[in-house]
Image: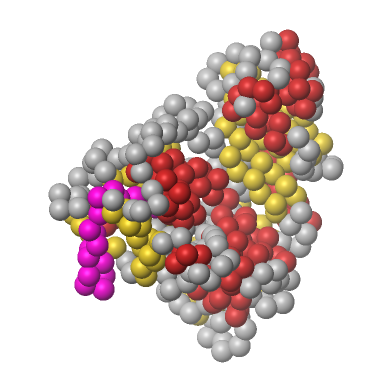
Amino acid sequence: MNYVIIGAGPSGVVAAETLRNSDPNGKITLIGEEAFDPYSRMAIPYYLTGNIEAKGTYLRKSANHFVNRGIEVVRAKVTKVSSGEKVVSLDNGTSVSYDKLLVATGSHPLKPPVDGLDQPGVHHCWTLEDAKNIIELAHEGADVVLMGAGFIGCIILEALALRNVNLTVVEMGDRMVPRMMDETAGGMLKKWCENKGVTVHTGTRVTKLESSGRSDEDNLLVDLENGEQIPAHLVVVATGVKSNMSFLEGSGVETDQGILVDDHLETNVEGIYAAGDVAQGLDFSTGGRSVHAIQPTSADHGRIAGLNMAGTEAAYKGSLSMNVLDTIGLVSCSFGQWQGAEGGETASAVDEENFKYIKLQFKEDKLVGAIVVGRTEHIGALRGLIQAEIPLGDWKDKLVEDPHQIMDAWVARGTGLAL
């Protein structure tokens, strides 16, 4: 059997290893377009802060890991998938044939429609190459503007703050991390960052970047919608991402926000699978299909896809929407239907002064979503209660009265056994 995997991130690597474990004799080709060994984007902030070297981001530390597993790594960009002929075309003029194909190409950062983003000193923070460019500019005391305070933006925010730059954050939403936090949590996060010396603008956007005419540090001027103008040596753009799937045009593979897959991670075209940030797969909370761009989902997708490609039937129960942030020391999390379920009930407790907040969402007597800020205890139990879908009975009323009794509810309802 000839297996081809497009994309050398967590999904692709886990899938390749799963295939090798399931099929010792199959040919496995892993195609990645970057010059580096397969690495984790989630490790880039640790590289930015100097906690690890570039090699520390690599998914597998042994130099011969893939060779020893009989996995061929090809460095090239896929330009076309011909599903009828079962051939993948590469930008180096060559092609690779397959019996089973996995698309695990992830996503790419979006460039907002702002004049001046093509100037020197403006970078995304998505690849190792991006990180190297940022490290050259983000020295201590440098004026840095970060466009975007979503999930990815806040991960970058912490890395930049730890480099002791003079940081300004601009978020067009009415709060920080609007797709992860409600108004209370987002406001708490903003106040925390401001207390740490970060300037945060919410409810506004960058309208233009222009040259300051200076040749020294602050060679850029960042114009804001609210009329302010900020000098900058570095501008980091983190305003969203989009799935990498344009090369599938003409392949017959159905796409939406991502590549549409079933509970076996297979697309509508037999023998073609998708996994990770590019896959629009089963959503545990809603029963629909969503793109969940988090590494745990990517790894789960890769394992399930690999098993099915090798002929071992494995159904995916769906990914739980889950986000965990550590923003300059303040940990925040959201799980499942954190906005609430139709006809459901909400319970919350907030301690603004000490930056602590918990909000639980119920559907009938089941816990379906949560937001937590400033509390790291019992987070696993909280996630377990949601995933186990256990009727809480009278424990629902107890949690409504006191949302902090998470661990007690977890033990009382036998959640560990259910999972």
Q: Which residue is located at x 62 percent, y 55 percent? A: 154
Q: Nearer the viewer, residue 191 or 226?
A: 191
Q: Which residue is located at x 60 percent, y 80 percent? A: 136
Residue 124 shows up from this direction = no
Q: Which residue is located at x 62 percent, y 48 percent? A: 176
Magenta extent: 88-104
Q: Position of residue 414 (x, y in %)?
A: 71, 19
Judge whether residue 101 is colored magenta: yes
Q: Position of residue 88 (x, y in %)?
A: 24, 59
Numbered label tally: 0
Image-quadrant location for residue 396: top right
Q: Nearer the viewer, residue 153 or 276?
A: 276
Q: Nearer the viewer, residue 142 or 359?
A: 359
Residue found farthest to the front? 25
Colour setting: secondary structure
Q: Nearer the viewer, residue 190 or 310?
A: 310
Q: Position of residue 76 (x, y in %)?
A: 33, 69
Image height check: is 88 above or below 52?
Answer: above
Q: Position of residue 231 (x, y in %)?
A: 61, 74
Image-quadrant location for residue 141: bottom right
Residue found farthest to the top? 394
Q: Which residue is located at x 58 percent, y 71 percent? A: 55
Judge whether residue 351 is colored magenta: no
Image height check: is 273 above or below 357?
Answer: below
Residue found farthest to the left? 84
Image height check: is 113 above or below 381?
Answer: below
Residue 413 falls left or right of residue 172 = right
Residue 274 shows up from this direction = yes
